[in-house]
Image (cartoon, rainbow, N blue to C red):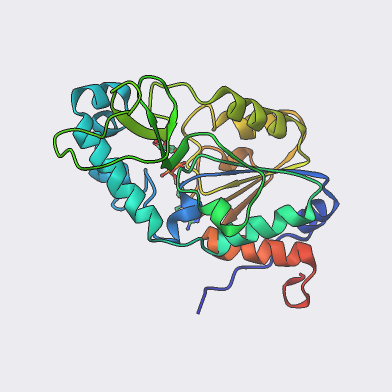
Amino acid sequence: MAAASPPPPVQLVAALRAARRVAVLTGAGVSAESGVPTFRDAQTGLWAEFDPLELATPAAFARNPRRVWDWYAMRRDMVGRVAPNPAHVALADLEKRIPEFLLVTQNVDGLHQRAGSRRVVELHGNITRVRCSREGTPVFRWSDDDVDAPPRCASCGAFLRPDVVWFEEMLPADALGAAEDAASRCDVLLVVGTSAEVYPAAALPILARRRGALVVEVNTETTPLSAQADYALRGPAGVVLPALVAAVRGDAASTP
Ligand code: OAD
């Protein structure tokens, strides 16, 4: 049986009911309960086991393309075998009730879309997509037959790469622009399951706060954002968010 969440603060529920514009920023923690590992959690985080400089930079890909390709192929395979959890579903449900809504995610797993979220901006790309490493063109069919190297682009012969953002790379300008616009105009920003350490995503809550939005953190742990948030809701997103959205909906059992 799922753990019970304390009732969400009454003023927060009222603010979400009244809000016309809501933005959400999610990180790896929102997918943790689906079985997707986070990055920085001690013991279980990917960066506790793997070195990002050897796997998630352009230089790493240039040095050892096969190793980088294989690591992402392993994660792509894993993402295909998991399912959205109640946190993803609650956010998709919340979207239906808010006139202007944008979900900004740092995750590359596509689980928000699979849960039914429609207005989604992916700041760090999507691991299920592949593109040419030279021309950037999306590639929908490729063969993993060549055991010595990643598959090649059929048009120019360069290696294919996952369509994600690596360290030292720019974020897609349109995605970042849409995220900054939503953060600067929203009434409420929910920040869910992110360590709030990686920029420019970590600047979005600061921008929202400066522009007068209510900033709400949902996280199992304290983060650098916690002290600046109007509300810091402690607990697993898969428990806290369904309770919050049920209260906004006005479900009898969850109304404080
Ligand atoms: P992190 O691994 O840095 O942080 C995950 C956060 O989720 C932590 O603050 C945890 O406390 C929290 N958390 C864990 N389980 C949770 C749960 N069930 N419910 C709520 N919170 C939970 O992941 P991100 O902040 O997403 O970038 O990391 C940002 C970026 O750094 C990633 O997109 C990735 C990484 O390096 C690239 O690969 C470019």
Residue 93 seen anywhere in this rendered image of the structure: yes
Q: Residue at x 69, y 33 (%)?
A: 183
Q: Is residue 13 left or right of residue 66?
A: right
Residue 209 seen anywhere in this rendered image of the structure: no
Looking at the image, the residue that sits furthest to the left is 148
Could you tell me residue 165's position as x and y percent? Answer: 43, 30
- Looking at the picture, tell me which residue is in the foreground, 139 or 119: 139
- Looking at the picture, tell me which residue is in the foreground, 24 or 214: 24
Q: Quadrant of the C terminus?
A: bottom right
- Looking at the picture, tell me which residue is in the foreground, 30 or 72: 72
Could you tell me residue 86's position as x and y percent? Answer: 56, 64
Can you tell me which quadrant of the image ligand 1 is in? Answer: top left
Could you tell me residue 123's position as x and y percent? Answer: 53, 34
Vertical comparison of 220 with 124: above or below = below
Q: Residue at x 73, y 30 (%)?
A: 184
Q: Residue at x 52, y 63 (%)?
A: 85
Figure label count: 0
Q: Is residue 102 left or right of residue 28?
A: right
Looking at the image, the residue that sits furthest to the bottom is 1
